[in-house]
């Protein structure tokens, strides 16, 4: 729903009334949304103008874009969409397709009348823009050329060159605004950048245009701790941080809750933030203000099995790995705090259940995607629990084989060029985690001597 499906359908309905040759192609919808699209087409008599392809392989996307004239991006204005422009918009531009987008900050790459159009969330307005692009034989080619030019700023060679230039500037102190002063370490450069993201004593934002959130405050604290800046906190500063973190906890159930949910799945938002806040408080030698009352949901090993199956962990359902990890973190936290053997028994059941449900590649789920990249992405969350507890992870060498097989010629692990934070992090940590130390099998990323020096410096400085 937060992808603007109904706005798309209503806009195309109005556009088809003016020109029955207009067709909306939807790729990536699950069966529930496919049914919504089909029902809408039947209700308004535009079924032939709505083509839904369902879930498709990523390799099919370039062909689908090639057959299109214009692409749509309608998103809700929620915190998760404010962090960075959506990747699909860049992909649309790279294919030379103008983008019609709704007016929110994350669509900052779309320039009205230049490489696309910014529209009100009004079907009639959007339909008029679609019709204009359909009819104006000079407008569409011009916007298409501009779209390609916009995408060129994300060309890998250009991005790499700019990255090297910025790192060189930081290492030599040539960029006074963002780089360390001569003689500063890498930690100095990172901390200087972090200060530019600071909104108040305990509030930080993810980037220049984002809002400060409790999530980014946790991330900032983790960075400060990484470089041992938290050791320099005064008692008053530490108390201020603890109070800020504790203010997010709900007394009724013990969850730490964000003011706005980042996921449609509210439980996942609460579990994620609670894990971050527990870790952040631990760095400050502090504890939650209220008991974790929600743990009463899992009093016995049987309740652990029931929850894992309810989440679809055995089937590799998207996001189930996160939920399994959160559960184990909560149990680990409470066992470490209380030494209550009930929590240890629940953890043992957690491990036994996962051992019993692994597939042949070492992941969870038996469909094709659960045996490759999706399985790695989902399963990495459970791997972390094995690594933390120093438990033997069955089929670890096979898991590492899959991780290495996803690496591209540039050294990244994402399915698209240029890498991706989660993809690269998950694969690299998997190849070096547990008892398998096969980092040497990982092809190095394109690296200049400057970057090599930076990596070496960060390694030396990391605690």
Image (tube, rainbow, N blue to C red):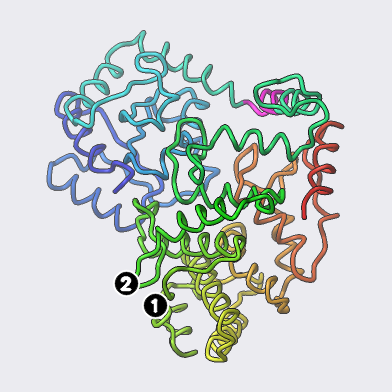
- Secondary structure type for disc 1: helix
User: Which residue is tagged 2?
Assistant: 252
Identity of the residue drawn at 36% across and 8% down: 138
Identity of the residue drawn at 53% across and 52% down: 218
Neighbor class of circle 1 (other Cα within 10 Å; few <14, some 14-19, many 20+) is: few
User: Which residue is tagged 1?
Assistant: 293
As for residue 124 lying within the magenta part, the answer is no
Number of the label disc, if any, that sits on residue 163:
none
Quarter of the figure with residue 114: top left
As for residue 160 lying within the magenta part, the answer is yes
Q: Nearer the viewer, residue 452 or 7?
A: 452
Quarter of the figure with residue 210: top left
Q: Give x and y (percent) for residue 170.
A: 75, 27
Q: Nearer the viewer, residue 132 or 336?
A: 336
Horizontal side, residue 385 vs residue 245: left or right: right
Q: Which residues are magenta?
A: 155-162
- Secondary structure type for disc 2: loop
Q: Give x and y (percent) for residue 87.
A: 50, 36
Assign the C terminus to one quadrant of the image. Answer: bottom right
Identity of the residue drawn at 84% across and 38% down: 452
Q: Give x and y (percent) for residue 215.
A: 48, 51
Identity of the residue drawn at 47% across and 84% down: 305
Quarter of the figure with residue 133: top left
Lower position in the chain sequence, tag 2 or tag 1: 2
Q: Nearer the viewer, residue 196 or 113?
A: 196
Q: Are marks 2 and 1 in contact (CB under 8 Å)?
A: yes
């Amino acid at each position: 729903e937060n992808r603007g499906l109904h706005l798309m359908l209503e806009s195309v309905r109005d556009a088809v009334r003016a020109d029955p040759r207009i067709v909306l192609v939807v790729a990536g919808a699950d069966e529930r949304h496919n049914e919504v699209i089909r029902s809408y087409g039947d209700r308004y008599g535009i079924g032939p103008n709505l083509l839904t392809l369902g879930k498709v392989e990523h390799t099919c996307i370039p062909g689908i874009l090639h057959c299109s004239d214009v692409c749509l991006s309608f998103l809700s204005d929620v915190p998760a969409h404010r962090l960075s422009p959506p990747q699909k918009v860049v992909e649309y531009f790279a294919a030379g397709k103008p983008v019609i987008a709704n007016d929110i900050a994350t669509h900052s790459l779309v320039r009205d009348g230049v490489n696309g159009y910014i529209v009100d969330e009004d079907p009639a307005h959007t339909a008029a823009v679609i019709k204009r692009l359909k009819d104006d034989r000079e407008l569409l080619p011009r916007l298409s050329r501009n779209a390609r030019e916009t995408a060129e700023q994300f060309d890998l060679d250009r991005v790499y060159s700019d990255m090297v230039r910025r790192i060189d500037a930081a290492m030599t102190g040539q960029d006074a605004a963002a780089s360390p002063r001569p003689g500063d370490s890498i930690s100095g450069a990172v901390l200087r950048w972090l200060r530019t993201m600071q909104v108040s004593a305990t509030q930080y934002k993810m980037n220049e245009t984002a809002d400060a959130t409790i999530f980014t405050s946790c991330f900032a604290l983790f960075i400060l701790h990484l470089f041992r800046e938290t050791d320099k906190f005064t008692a008053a500063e530490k108390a201020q941080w603890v109070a800020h973190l504790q203010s997010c906890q709900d007394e009724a159930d013990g969850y730490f809750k964000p003011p706005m949910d980042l996921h449609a799945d509210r439980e996942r938002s609460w579990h994620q933030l609670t894990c971050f806040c527990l870790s952040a408080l631990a760095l400050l030698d502090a504890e939650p203000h209220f008991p974790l009352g929600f743990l009463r949901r899992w009093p016995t090993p049987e309740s652990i099995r029931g929850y894992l199956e309810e989440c679809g962990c055995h089937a590799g359902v998207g996001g189930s790995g996160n939920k399994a990890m959160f559960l184990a973190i909560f149990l680990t936290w409470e066992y470490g705090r209380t030494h209550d053997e009930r929590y240890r028994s629940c953890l043992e059941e957690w491990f036994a259940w996962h051992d019993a449900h692994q597939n042949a590649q070492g992941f969870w789920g038996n469909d094709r995607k659960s045996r490759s990249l999706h399985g790695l992405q989902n399963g990495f969350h459970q791997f972390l629990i094995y690594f933390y507890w120093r438990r033997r992870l069955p089929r670890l060498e096979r898991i590492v084989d899959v991780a290495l097989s996803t690496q591209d010629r540039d050294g990244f692990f994402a399915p698209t060029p240029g890498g991706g934070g989660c993809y690269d992090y998950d694969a690299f940590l998997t190849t070096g985690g547990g008892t398998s130390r096969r980092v040497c099998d990982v092809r190095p990323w394109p690296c200049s001597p400057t970057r090599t020096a930076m990596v070496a410096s960060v390694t030396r400085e990391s605690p």
